[in-house]
Amino acid sequence: MSTGGRGPRIGVLALQGDVREHARMLEALGASVSLVRRPTELAAVDGLVLPGGESGVIDRLARITGLREPLREAIAGGLPVLGTCAGMILLADRLLDGTPGQETFGGLDATARRNAFGSQSDSFETDLEIPALGPPAVRTAFIRAPLIEELGPRARAVATLPDGRLVGAEQGSVLGIAFHPEATGEQRFHRRLLERVRAR
Ligand code: GLN
């Protein structure tokens, strides 16, 4: 599938998860959106969204479809990528509390912890000031969200909870956030991805 305008060609990894919401948001921003389910489709995009969902399932399906290695190589090679929630987990170089055998694609010098918020606050919404985006504050939705437990020297923090816990980081043109901007209508992260693609 490929839709939308004449803007940059952005893929949404469409193995599992909230693919449609990202595709809609990218289309609203004028991107030409395609769903990525196989290596030839990945090769045709200039930027990529890794959606939320179940990171263990997405990892497994990426192996089955032969996408895992091409994805790893594309990200390492500088493909601009936005990963949200499970997508952020998949971007982290190191993972805690993964499902048995689960691996990540890497790209962010960070350690992510899956399902880092206890069952009581499994899912919540909150407003976060994100200096890289400027005002207004970002309405964020955390849905069985991960945390960044540790950030390596190659990445930098982008989003932090009021108690100091890290929920977003960036490294070159790779951006990972633990929350769901597509669920709250927040467009600035997707705009940032498009800017990275245009700048490349
Ligand atoms: N808990 C999910 C995982 O481990 C992430 C949740 C989400 O993407 N909303 O991958």
Image: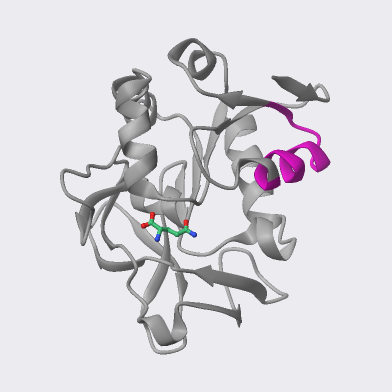
43 is higher (above) or lower (below) than 187: above
Residue 24 located within the stretch drawn in magenta? yes
Work out whether residue 133 can be spotted: yes
Q: Quadrant of residue 125?
A: bottom right
x%, y% of residue 137? Answer: 67, 77
State the residue lying farthest toward the top: 40
Counting labels gives 0
Nearest the viewer among 66 and 160 is: 66
Q: Main secondary structure of the magenta part?
A: helix
Residue at the image position 36 percent from the left and 25 percent from the top = 77
What residue span does the magenta drawing correspond to? 21-33
x%, y% of residue 50? Answer: 49, 41
Residue at the image position 81 percent from the left and 34 percent from the top = 30
x%, y% of residue 155? Answer: 32, 55
Q: In this image, 25 relative to 120: left or right? A: right
x%, y% of residue 110? Answer: 26, 56
Task: Pick the quarter of the image with the C terminus.
Answer: top right
Quadrant location of ligand 1? bottom left
